[in-house]
Image (cartoon, helix red, strand yellow):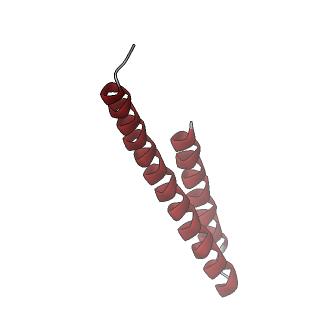
Amino acid sequence: MPTLQELSAKVDELQTSLDAEQTAIQAAIDGLNAVIADLQSQVAAGGTDADRQAVVDKITAVKTDLEGTIA
C-alpha cells in the first residue's frame, strides 16, 4: 500500500500533467481566436478570394492543431 507521501507525489505529478495540457489547449484556443478575428477583419474589409482562402487555410490548420492537442 502506498504511503501518503507517495500518494501526494502522484497527485503532484497529475497536477503538473494537467497544467501542461491546459496550457496547450489554451494556446490552441488562442490561435483559433486570432484566426477568427483575422477572418472577421478580412470579411469586413471585403478581401479578395485569395485572402479569404488564406484565412480558411489558417482555420483548417488551427483546427487540426487543436484536434491533435485534445487527442
Vertical placement of 14 versus 53: above or below?
above
Q: Position of residue 56 (x, y in %)?
A: 64, 61
Q: Residue furthest bottom?
A: 45
Q: Position of residue 68 (x, y in %)?
A: 53, 40
The structure residue drawn at horizontal position 59% and vertical position 75%, both measured from the top left corner, is 37
Q: Position of residue 63 (x, y in %)?
A: 60, 51
Asked whether, in this view, residue 6 is left or right of residue 57, the answer is left
Near-viewer residue (62 or 13): 13
Quarter of the image for the C terminus: give it.
Answer: top right
The structure residue drawn at horizontal position 57% and vertical position 62%, both measured from the top left corner, is 32
Vertical placement of 42 versus 18: above or below?
below
Q: Position of residue 9 (x, y in %)?
A: 32, 32
Figure label count: 0
Vertical placement of 17 versus 42: above or below?
above
Q: Which of the 4 image quadrants contains residue 57? A: bottom right
Asked whether, in this view, residue 68 is left or right of residue 23, the answer is right
Near-viewer residue (34 or 5): 5
Quarter of the image for the N terminus: give it.
Answer: top left
Vertical placement of 19 versus 59: above or below?
above
Near-viewer residue (57 or 10): 10
